[in-house]
Amino acid sequence: MGFFSKTIGRLAAIVLDLDYTQQPKEQIAALNDFLTKNKFEIETGDLEEFLALLKKKHFVDSITISKAGELVASSEGDGIGDSFASAALIEFIGKQIEDPQTVLMKMTDCWFMIFPFNQNIYIIKAGTSLSTIELRALARELDSFLKKEKNSRVRNSISAKKILN
């Protein structure tokens, strides 16, 4: 009788989509400990410092921002090749697949992720792949920083013109 009841229980769990897994309490405790020790309030006006802090926050190895194949910023300083290759790859994939949202490639030692967002292409290298939600969060943070930086440059330019006149 035990065999049939176990089999019926397993079948019912599959049909009813029951999930008896528990939360990984050790991992959650480790993450909570990490987050209490490290605050990620990024208050800086320097792009290089912002990229370095963002790398730590999102556990990635490098961040490169490209616009139409031209390098906007890179956390490692050598993003010209990545930005050109990513723009060409997105263009090629865009011809094959309509409106690609994310390109993930597994390299020998890391993941290479390309994420187009608001006219920019974000190129991320990391030891593990990031989900689309994580990539979007990273892109939004960078996008808002770049907009703030652009607005402050415009304000400074207008202020300088007023002083000169």
Image: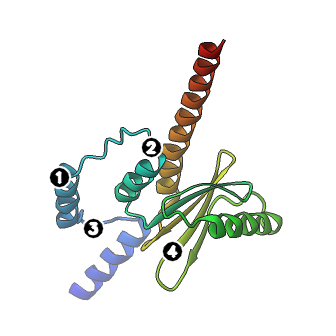
Quadrant holding the C terminus? top right
Q: Which residue carries the number 4 mark?
A: 111
Query: Residue 113: percent from the left, percent from the top?
Result: 56, 67
Tag 1 near tag 4, CB within 8 Å: no
Other-residue count near label 3 (Cα within 10 Å), few / some / many at <14 / 14–19 / ≥20:
few
Q: Nearer the viewer, residue 83 or 57?
A: 83
- Nearest-to-viewer mark from 3 and 2: 2
- Nearest-to-viewer mark from 4 and 3: 4
Task: Tell me the CA gap for discs 1 and 2.
Answer: 24 Å
Comes first in the chain, label 1 or label 3: 3
Q: Would residue 86 be seen by someone viewing this image from the given angle?
A: yes
Q: Which residue carries the number 1 mark?
A: 37
Which amino acid type corresponds to the residue marked 1 in the rendered image? Answer: Lys
Task: Tell me the CA gap for discs 1 and 4.
Answer: 27 Å
Other-residue count near label 4 (Cα within 10 Å), few / some / many at <14 / 14–19 / ≥20:
some
Q: Which residue carries the number 3 mark?
A: 21
Placement of 132 over or under 137, stated as above or below: below
Q: Which mark is residue 46?
A: 2
Which amino acid type corresponds to the residue marked 2 in the rendered image? Answer: Asp
Residue 85 falls left or right of residue 156 = right
